[in-house]
């Protein structure tokens, strides 16, 4: 019997299907409502912090200008005395002051200049001979080598009747105290704002962790190191912090530029004169803008560091609770 050909029962194995890689879900929740709110809060805190730093810089610089202007001059005031020639007294006071080392120049305020000084209060057309108006001698001094004001005061009082020497020391001390107080208050406010930012980031980090708490615990117990998990949160919050801080810093710079532009456009007006007298021309300068950039960087780094510490502390608490439960 002839054997019939038998077909092979062996079939080729089907080609393996291409594996589709599943996208790994991030440990930290992506940008959500809470994340956008945190960016907005950080932007507000940065904006207020930069405004505080700019205001402190403006007041400090203006106080320094006032201090330098006042420290460069002293004033000799001579009150009218019956039977005493005022012009001779002024000349004698100028001669005494001019002989001291450290005096760069002496200038007597003449009758016309004195009348102009009093014009806003007493009107024009004043007759100084009919009014007991004190006369002034302006003494320009060397800031680096000031004269001996105590000796100058003694010689003036001995030689000129009705004389008084004002070296503006009281005003300088008050300006210095005001500047130091302003800087101290500004720094205290800045620290409070940074502290509020840290607390906000702590709450936001704990909120993000509570949303994925079970995933974080599983990853941690199967071997994921705390620093790996913390790095995920750190990079996420660093990006959020830098976004918010940059937005707040840019907004603060725009405010300072706008005020500086307004001040330059409104020169010689009463409003601008008063504002300029208090805050200068609202220009914080390169140092001020550098401080704004530094605050932006500090808040961004502080946000990342705060989230890192919060995550590490949270995982340590989990480890302690787990060991206690065993």
Image: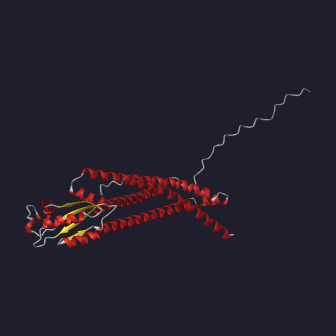
Looking at this view, name the residue that lies furthest to the front.
Answer: 99
Q: Nearer the viewer, residue 59 or 76?
A: 76
Q: Nearer the viewer, residue 283 or 166?
A: 166
Query: In which image quadrant can residue 211 be found?
Result: bottom right
Q: Which quarter of the figure is the C terminus placed in?
A: bottom right
Q: Nearer the viewer, residue 244 or 108?
A: 108
Query: In which image quadrant can residue 96 be found?
Result: bottom left
Tell me which residue sits at (60%, 57%) in the image: 229
Q: Which quarter of the figure is the N terminus placed in?
A: top right
Tell me which residue sits at (16%, 70%) in the image: 79
Residue 32 visible in the displayed image: no
Q: Position of residue 21 (x, y in %)?
A: 63, 45
Residue 227 is left or right of residue 35, and the answer is right
Tell me which residue sits at (22%, 70%) in the image: 156
Q: Position of residue 300 (x, y in %)?
A: 48, 56
Q: How many marks?
A: 0
Query: In which image quadrant can residue 216 be found?
Result: bottom right
Coloration of the structure image: secondary structure
Looking at this view, name the residue that lies furthest to the right.
Answer: 1
Q: Nearer the viewer, residue 54 or 303?
A: 54
Residue 9 is left or right of residue 226, and the answer is right
Residue 322 is left or right of residue 129, and the answer is right
Q: Position of residue 319 (x, y in %)?
A: 64, 66
Looking at this view, name the residue that lies furthest to the top.
Answer: 2
């Amino acid at each position: 019997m002839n054997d019939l050909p038998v077909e092979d029962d062996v079939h080729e194995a089907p080609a393996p299907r291409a594996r589709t890689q599943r996208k790994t879900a991030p440990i930290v929740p992506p940008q959500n409502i809470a994340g956008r709110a945190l960016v907005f809060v950080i932007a507000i805190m940065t904006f207020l912090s930069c405004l505080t730093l700019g205001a402190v810089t403006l007041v400090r610089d203006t106080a320094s200008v006032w201090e330098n202007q006042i420290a460069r001059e002293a004033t000799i005031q001579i009150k009218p005395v019956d039977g005493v020639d005022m012009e001779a007294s002024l000349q004698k006071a100028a001669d005494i002051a001019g002989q001291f080392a450290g005096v760069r120049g002496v200038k007597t305020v003449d009758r016309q200049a004195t009348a102009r000084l009093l014009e806003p209060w007493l009107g024009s057309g004043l007759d100084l001979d009919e009014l007991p108006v004190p006369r002034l001698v302006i003494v320009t001094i060397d800031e680096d080598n000031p004269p001996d004001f105590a000796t100058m005061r003694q010689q003036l009082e001995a030689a000129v009747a009705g004389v008084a020497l004002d070296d503006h020391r009281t005003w300088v001390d008050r300006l210095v105290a005001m500047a130091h107080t302003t800087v101290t208050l500004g720094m205290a406010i800045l620290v409070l704002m940074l502290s509020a930012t840290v607390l906000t980031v702590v709450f936001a980090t704990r909120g993000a962790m509570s949303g994925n708490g079970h995933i974080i615990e599983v990853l941690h117990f199967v071997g994921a190191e705390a620093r790996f998990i913390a790095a995920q949160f750190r990079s996420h919050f660093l990006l959020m912090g830098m976004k918010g801080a940059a937005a707040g810093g840019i907004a603060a710079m725009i405010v300072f530029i706008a005020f500086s532009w307004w001040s330059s456009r409104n020169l010689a007006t009463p409003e601008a004169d008063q504002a300029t007298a208090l805050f200068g021309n609202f220009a914080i300068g390169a140092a001020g803008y550098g401080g704004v950039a530094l605050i932006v960087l500090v808040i961004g780094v502080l946000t990342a560091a705060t989230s890192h510490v919060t995550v590490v502390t949270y995982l340590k608490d989990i480890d302690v609770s787990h060991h206690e439960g065993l």
